[in-house]
Image (cartoon, grey):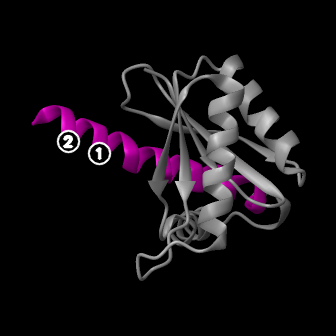
Amino acid sequence: MRILAVDYGDSRTGLAISDKSEILASPLLTIYEKDFERCAQAVAENARKNGAEMIVVGDPINMNGTRGPRSEKCRQFAQMLRELTGLEVNMWDERSTTVSAISIMNENNKRGQKRKEALDQAAAAIILESYLAYRKNVSAR
């Protein structure tokens, strides 16, 4: 099943997609859109164009496990994606994904605008890798 991962942001939203065998998570693109609804429509369109059968939206849960305003906004975004696509949309804990993505950018010496673009896609890919590992572990039981 092809799964699309979303790292939603107020200005930039990173997307990543899995292969059909759910082994690889590949950065896909960055959507530059500040309007909530237009961003959701762009994500839904990319889900359709890339044959996604499920969507995973990163949930920025606080480090202490509580949910704040940012988490609520991402949940609203996920609900809008459900309505626009008719697909299953799951929330996935994204704590520390941006920190991990920054580390990857530093290791690859990415700078400037390309860094910002790659950062959001890398965060989405990290969210997707974590979700795919979870699915693999659950189905192995």
Distance of label 2 from label 1 (alpha carbons):
5 Å
Q: Which residue ends up furthest to the bottom in the rendered image?
A: 64
Quick one: quadrant of the N terminus? top left
Q: Nearer the viewer, residue 79 or 119?
A: 79
| Residue at the (68%, 60%) spot, across then down | 73
Residue 30 place in picture, x, y as percent: 76, 45
Query: Which disc, if any, is residue 137?
Result: 2
| Circle 2 residues within 10 Å: few <14, some 14–19, many ≥20 | few
Residue 108 part of the magenta-drawn span: no
Q: Are the residues tagged 2 and 1 within 8 Å (C-beta)?
A: yes
Whether residue 19 sits left or right of residue 50 in the image: it is left
Q: Give, as a single range, the part of the protein colored magenta.
A: 115-141
Please give the label number shown on residue 115: none
Q: What residue type is labelled 2?
A: Asn
- For this view, does 139 lie left or right of residue 22? left
Let me know if residue 135 is in the magenta part: yes
Label 1 crowd (10 A; few <14 / some 14-19 / many >=20) = few
Q: What residue is shown at x 58% (from left), y 49% (from top)?
A: 124
Question: Residue 134: which disc?
Answer: 1
Of helix, strand and loop, which one carries label 2? helix
Amino acid tagged 1: Tyr
Q: In which quarter of the image is the C terminus?
A: top left
**Where 11 falls versus 137 (above or below)?**
below
Image quadrant in which you'd find residue 4 = top right
